[in-house]
Amino acid sequence: MDEPVIQALSSQTCDLIAVRDQRDRAAFGRLFDHFAPRLKAMMVKGGLRDGSAEDAVQDVMLAVWHKAAQFDPHRADAAGWIYGIARNRRIDLARRRPLAQPEDLPEIESDAPDPAQILALQQEASHLVAALCRLAPEQAEALRAAYFDDIPHSRISEMTGLPLGTIKSRIRLGLERLRHELRKIAP
Amino acid sequence: MTQITHHIPDDILDAWRAGALSHPYAVVVAAHLSLCDECRAAVETADMIGGALLDGLEGQALDAGARQRMMDALDTPAPPPVRGSGVFPAPVVAALGGQPPQWRMLGGGIRQQILSADREGALRLLYIPPGRAVPEHGHRGLELTLVLQGSFSDSEGAFLRGDVETAHDSIDHQPVAGPGAPCICLAATDAPLRFHALLPRLLQPIFRI
Ligand SMILES: [Zn+2]
Ligand SMILES: [Zn+2]
């Protein structure tokens, strides 16, 4: 891959590509060191106890290893792609039957990267992080509750004492602002 | 490949991402995502937001042996992926239990196979010969219908492979299969349909439409 593209990729995304193309165990170890503690925090926030949270982290990271052939840096960064796997794992632990999943994407041909598209996507990802940092605290809190605590919206309102309409509009405002940020860079 | 023009509404896509959809609707959403790059990209965009939030979380320390257990587990074989077959994308193949459909005659050349029916609602495959109409009906709840082969049209428009019709309880419609290949669709409901003609209503308990 071209030098400027490699420089724009997060080191996690580079490691994930090395896992995909070379089955690189050292790169996988670095991904584990970065994401496993964060995934554990996500699972604990989602209501899992310590032991089950660690089991869920192992399930997610093993799926990362097994599904790496599907990772496409034109479509996602490492954090977003791994989050998608973790979101599904946490949902399935909470449901009576597993959530139906779309068909796997075809395995990626590693020989034809489109540097412009990869660069644009990585820039989008860093703008996203910047936009998250600019959210008002209560918007950020509502967004985090919606993404990580997996609480139905009606329960959020019981906990905070805010009417449901307020919670929903806060979440929507936060998401709208993020979508607006995204549109500015990728119309 | 035809252009998909009828997509999963945002609120239903959000509910799927949150794991809040009942099984019949979730299968329709997953089947549409298998065919529609636009909705899949919407899910991936939302996951980028989730990924950015994940990256910003303060991590929690793992058990001392966790890393080694992980590295030791890497040699376990990967579970075989479920693949699509013919017009059926992978989530429909999974709902069929990996078997080809076993059609039951409904009359008028229309066939169905019920894939699941319980408290969560009903999921079925419908087979409608070209030019045939499904009896006109209303809905008590939400009906999601995904075209897998052929096409149908009704008061809401024309629906081709990959298109989803979202019918709420306010809509009364009479889908008619287009010319050419028989129309095969995947339909999810959360309550029995309301048929207007007397005969289908009498048949309803028998066929569990
Ligand atoms: Zn779509
Ligand atoms: Zn209907």
Image (cartoon, coloured by chain):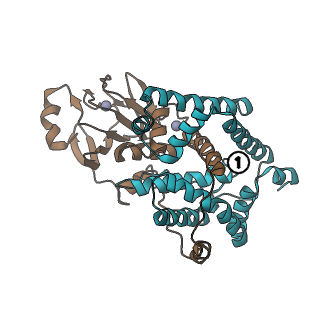
User: Ligand 2 falls in which quarter?
Assistant: top left
Placement of A132 over or under A14, stated as above or below: above
Residue at (43% x, 55% y) in the render: A92
The brown one among the chains is B
- Protein chain holding label 1: A
Dividing the image into 4 quarters, which one contains the N terminus of chain A?
A: bottom right
Residue type, label 1: His
Look at the image and tell me whether residue A12 can be seen: yes
Q: How many marks?
A: 1
Residue at (71% x, 34% y) in the render: A186
Placement of A132 over or under A187, stated as above or below: below
Q: Residues within 10 Å of mark 1 (few under 14, many from 20)?
A: some
Placement of A74 over or under B139, stated as above or below: below
In front: A94, or B193? A94
The quarter of the displayed image where residue A184 is located? top right
Could you tell me residue B155's position as x and y percent?
A: 37, 21
The cyan one among the chains is A
The quarter of the displayed image where residue A65 is located? bottom right
B33 lies left or right of B201: right
Could you tell me residue A69's position as x and y percent?
A: 64, 61
Which residue matches tag 1? A74
Could you tell me residue B201's position as x and y percent?
A: 15, 32
A137 lies left or right of B112: right
Could you tell me residue B187's position as x and y percent?
A: 34, 40
Look at the image and tell me whether residue B161 can be seen: no
